[in-house]
Amino acid sequence: METGNGTHTLWLDYNNAGGIKCGTEYCVYPTKEQGYTELEMLVMRYYLKYGIDFKSWREEYCGLHCGEQDLNTFIEIYNEEMERETHALRERY
């Protein structure tokens, strides 16, 4: 998404973990936790709508201007997060 691995201005200044827009402007969240929660809800909506058809996720998220490399990067980030979550669950149980 848009966080630049935690270095992007949207994350640092707006607590916006996903480049989420409110109309034509980027949303500003009061806390990083709320910004991340909004991203989680967005991902859940896409998952419920498209499953793991990431090309459809990206088309809805950024229209037709996203390139193939952007899609590949998104898939890599998704897979890294899923691995991290799986590892965390295994640690708990």
Image (spheres, rainbow, N blue to C red):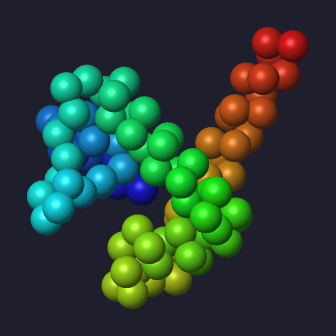
Quadrant location of the C terminus in the rendered image: top right
Q: Pick whichever, 80 or 61, lies toward us.
A: 61
Rendering coords of residue 26 (x, y %): 18, 53
Rendering coords of residue 72 (x, y %): 58, 71
Q: Pick whichever, 2 or 56, lies toward us.
A: 56
Side of 73 relative to 52 (left or right): left
Q: Residue 46: which quarter of the image?
A: bottom right
Q: Pick whichever, 85 or 37, lies toward us.
A: 37
Q: Residue at x 43, y 33 (%)?
A: 37
Position of 66 relative to 81 (above/below): below
Position of 63 relative to 14 (above/below): below
Position of 71 relative to 52 (above/below): below
Q: How many numbered marks have been drawn onto this rendered protein structure? A: 0
Q: Residue 51: which quarter of the image?
A: bottom right
Quadrant location of the N terminus in the rendered image: bottom left
Q: Residue at x 64, y 68 (%)?
A: 50
Q: Residue furthest top?
A: 92
Q: Residue 11: which quarter of the image?
A: top left
Q: Residue at x 39, y 40 (%)?
A: 38
Side of 4 relative to 9 (left or right): right
Q: Residue at x 62, y 42 (%)?
A: 81
Q: Pick whichever, 40 or 87, lies toward us.
A: 40
Residue 12 in view of the camera? no
Residue 58 in view of the camera? yes
Q: Residue furthest bottom?
A: 64
Rendering coords of residue 91 (x, y %): 80, 16
Rendering coords of residue 58 (x, y %): 48, 72
Side of 59 relative to 84 (left or right): left
